[in-house]
Image (spheres, grey):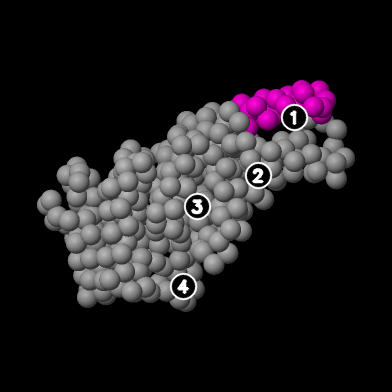
Amino acid sequence: MAPQLSEGAAPSPPALAPRQSWLTRLKDGLRKTGSSLTSVFAGTRIDEALYEELESALLMADAGVAATEHLLGELKQRVKRSGVSEPAALKGLLADALADLLKPLEQPLVIGQHQPTVIMVAGVNGAGKTTSIGKLTHHLADSGASVLLAAADTFRAAAREQLMVWAERNTVEIVSQADGDPAAVSFDAVAAGKARGKDVVLVDTAGRLPTQLHLMEELKKIKRVITKADPQAPDEVLLVIDGNTGQNALAQVKAFDEALQLTGLIVTKLDGTAKGGVLAAIALWARQRQAQHPDWRAVPVYFIGVGEKLEDLETFNAREFAQALLN
């Protein structure tokens, strides 16, 4: 996996074997969610009882009421157009409907339009934010980008130490201050990134709940100060969410978007969750948000994760996800 570079040719696509290995892990990770959905198609006839059972399964998978209604409406139209009569055939039609709903979330992370490309990363404690930053650093560096990390999660010493380990592991520079002000660390990192000619500056901000209003204000301050260091920055404002939290993850997306105007998501811990349907809810929210704010940037899912290893964070592909979910 590699981010898309804005200048010149994009990096060569990854070999088939690693991607196939990733797809196997994705299918395994989504098996808990998918099993409750696919069991619906074991019946003998397509009727209202089957649709009601599928509705319950989608709701249990945390697709949410709105996305569930959308998918069921789409599925019924596709059944009518195709003329299928066997429940087993519905699985492929549902995968198509889900892939179409998720497709707008499938966008590449573009770096290189500005130097440095400044990426601010937020998320609640426990979502896998700092680990995701470490994995993203690896992939950026692996694609040839020079990366500078900013340890702006100064409220938690362990987070700073964890980021320093990732910096050492990836052989990249880091700006860190013990007990420093998060906004000041962010400012210094962006200034250093410009002075040292770095391609990317990744800013790790403190984990917090969206209900902690004073801490959300601190996030807004960090974003403002980053803009003072570089008027076009931040280029990206990413939120890391835990796929295990289902509809609570969607609530986090809405709250952080209201505060920061997000530009992308990283969804972690999809392995073993029964709530993988939340991506459908996020996709429908993203569609409605775009209709309400056509001048705002979209909020794609840049990466999804199904484990702790470096190779367990990959670019999001709508059809792959839909097929893995309904395998």
Circle 4 — which element?
A: loop
Q: Residue at horizontal 23%, vertical 50%? A: 153
The residue indicated by pointer 3 is 301
**Which residue range is magenta in the image?**
36-58
The residue indicated by pointer 4 is 6
User: Which mark sits nearer the N-terminus, 4 or 2?
Assistant: 4
**Picture layout, residue 136 above or below residue 68:** below
The residue indicated by pointer 1 is 51
> Does the magenta-highlighted stretch encompass residue 56?
yes
Dot 4 amino acid type: Ser
User: Which mark sits nearer the N-terminus, 4 or 3?
Assistant: 4
**Picture layout, residue 104 above or below residue 158:** below
Circle 1 — which element?
A: helix
Q: For residue 201, what is the image quadrant?
A: bottom left
Front label number (3 vs 1) = 1
**Picture layout, residue 20 above or below residue 116:** above
